[in-house]
């Protein structure tokens, strides 16, 4: 007889839900960096010359491990669980059949302090997945921490649940900030292990399927500044990524956080998905009103995290991208713009997470405590060519392409979010060769 249990959302420690504009501030706070809130600034400064005499950056440990294909063999649907969707109006429990995939135990070779999982999956017929992680701290196995409950569609479109992160999981060892497992001060994990639960409505035959699952583990130095990285192989290269402004969407769809400043992540994701020719069709976006860059509204709806109450959940964005024809996606951290150049040289634009106060990124025209934009290329001098969806906070797509000073950009990205990047590309498109401590 299949076993039966109930998924619980009872928090261990109360946690206030994080709003989208605060998302990167969590990572910045973990690195000891204080940042200003969103406010307009004016003017653009001249690019600063590289100072190669600066002290070398301390070791930045980042390791990405993933599985695909036959490695993702799932066990039978041999148990059931009752789940109450906290965002469903009925509040009634639904019974699901459950199957499980469990990763090998991964020992990254350093004591990790943060981990972000990624997945590519399909969830037909009201099915969905739950991603969990556990690890070892001081020789003791931790509890399971939930990193996401996800399905590809909203319930109105046939999705099984409202996709959601899970607040309030903190204990003495670690906590989860929306999509990021973070250890408490004085604690590290020597290994980690993922578990994916695949859930389908009880008695049905529709099954979720996994095409890729992985996680990025990191242990980063507490530095507020990094030296300018050496120019890499993409200087003088620029990819033709379409430019969309998030400000065009101010006031759109309050149920998905009202557009504008809250939609930097889906706007950036939409730009990269469209670059690969995998954006939504006119039929898919027919519900969008007004129909201005409707692929952005479509993306915001399909990455929205109903507990986080925003569209900036990192792996929800890459998971959405992987639902588009032929694409795969994952979240990792890069150590420098030299590593970013390897992706541009391979023809792959990146979505990156930055934050900065007045004067830290000259030419932006604003400041932010959490923002995402696209790296589309590099000038011959090594400066960053970006599609910044909030550029000057102007609601016009022609203002989106900007050039930012390399050293300034590196320092609002690497120390602040730890170098977070969305990697989105066709499944058959080769990634650049990874470094010895592989972070992709």
Image: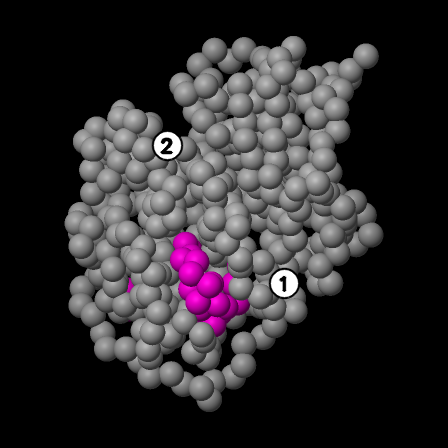
Q: Position of residue 242 (x, y in %)?
A: 28, 52
Q: In the image, residue 272 lies at what x, y percent?
A: 37, 50
In the image, which residues are magenta? 333-360
Closer to the chain start, of discs 1 and 2, is 2
* Left or right of 171 in this view: 320: left
Residue 393 in view of the camera = yes
Q: Which mark, by number, is residue 229?
A: none
Residue lying at 67% horizontally and 18% vertically, measured from the top left: 97
Residue 169 visible (yes or no): no
330 to 166, vertically: above or below: below
Question: Helix or strand or loop: what does disc 1 sit on?
Answer: loop
- Tell me the residue that label 1 is attached to: 438
Q: Is residue 403 above or below residue 348?
A: below
At a point 75% along the width and 56% down the height, the residue shown is: 107
Check if residue 90 falls in the magenta segment. no
Q: In which quarter of the image is the C terminus?
A: bottom right
Q: On the picture, is 337 further left or further right than 257?
A: right
Can you tell which quarter of the image residue 302 is in?
top left
Residue closer to the observer: 235 or 82: 235
On whether residue 340 falls in the magenta region, the answer is yes
Report how far apart the C-alphas of labels 1 and 2 lie in the structure: 33 Å
Residue shown at 43%/78% (left/top)?
231
Looking at the rendered structure, the secondary structure element under dot 2 is helix
Are dots 1 and 2 in contact, CB under 8 Å? Answer: no
Q: Residue at x 43, y 47 (%)?
A: 23
Which residue lies under the disc numbered 2? 301
Neighbour class for label 2 at 10 Å: few (<14), some, many (≥20)? some
Image spot of residue 56 (x, y percent): 54, 81
């Amino acid at each position: 007889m299949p076993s039966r249990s109930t998924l619980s959302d009872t928090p261990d420690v109360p946690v206030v839900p994080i709003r989208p504009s605060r998302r990167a501030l969590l990572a910045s706070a973990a690195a000891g960096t204080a940042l200003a809130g969103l406010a307009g600034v004016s003017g653009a400064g001249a690019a600063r010359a590289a100072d190669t005499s600066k002290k070398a950056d301390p070791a930045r440990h980042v390791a990405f491990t993933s599985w695909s294909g036959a490695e993702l063999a799932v066990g039978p649907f041999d148990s059931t669980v009752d789940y109450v969707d906290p965002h469903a109006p009925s509040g009634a429990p639904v019974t699901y059949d459950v199957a499980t995939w469990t990763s090998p135990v991964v020992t990254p070779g350093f004591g990790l302090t943060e981990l972000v999982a990624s997945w590519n999956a399909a969830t037909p017929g009201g099915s969905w997945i739950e991603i969990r992680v556990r690890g070892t701290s001081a020789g003791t196995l931790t509890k399971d921490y939930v990193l996401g409950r996800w399905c590809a569609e909203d319930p109105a479109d046939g999705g099984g649940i409202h996709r959601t992160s899970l607040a309030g999981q903190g204990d003495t060892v670690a906590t989860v900030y929306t999509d990021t497992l973070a250890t408490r001060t004085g604690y590290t994990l020597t290994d980690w292990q993922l578990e994916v639960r695949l859930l389908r409505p009880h008695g049905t035959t529709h099954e979720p399927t996994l095409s890729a699952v992985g996680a990025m583990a990191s242990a980063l130095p507490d530095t507020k500044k990094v030296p300018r990285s050496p120019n890499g192989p993409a200087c003088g290269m620029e990819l033709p990524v379409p430019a969309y402004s998030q400000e065009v969407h101010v006031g759109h769809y309050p149920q998905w956080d009202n557009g504008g400043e809250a939609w930097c992540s889906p706007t950036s994701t939409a730009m990269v998905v469209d670059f690969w020719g995998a954006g939504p069709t006119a039929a898919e976006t027919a519900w969008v009103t007004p129909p201005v860059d409707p692929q952005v509204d479509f993306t915001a709806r399909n990455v929205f995290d109903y507990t986080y109450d925003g569209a900036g959940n990192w792996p929800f964005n890459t998971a959405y991208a992987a639902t588009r024809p032929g694409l795969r996606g994952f979240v990792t951290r890069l150590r420098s713009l030299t590593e970013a150049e390897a992706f541009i040289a391979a023809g792959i634009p990146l979505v990156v997470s930055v934050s900065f106060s007045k004067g830290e990124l000259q030419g932006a025209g604003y400041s932010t405590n959490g923002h995402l934009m696209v790296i589309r290329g590099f000038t011959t001098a090594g400066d960053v060519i970006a599609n910044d969806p909030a550029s000057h906070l102007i609601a016009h797509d022609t203002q989106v392409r900007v050039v930012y000073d390399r050293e300034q950009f590196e320092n609002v990205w690497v120390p602040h979010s730890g170098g977070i990047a969305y990697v989105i590309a066709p499944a058959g498109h080769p990634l650049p060769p990874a470094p010895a401590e592989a972070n992709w």
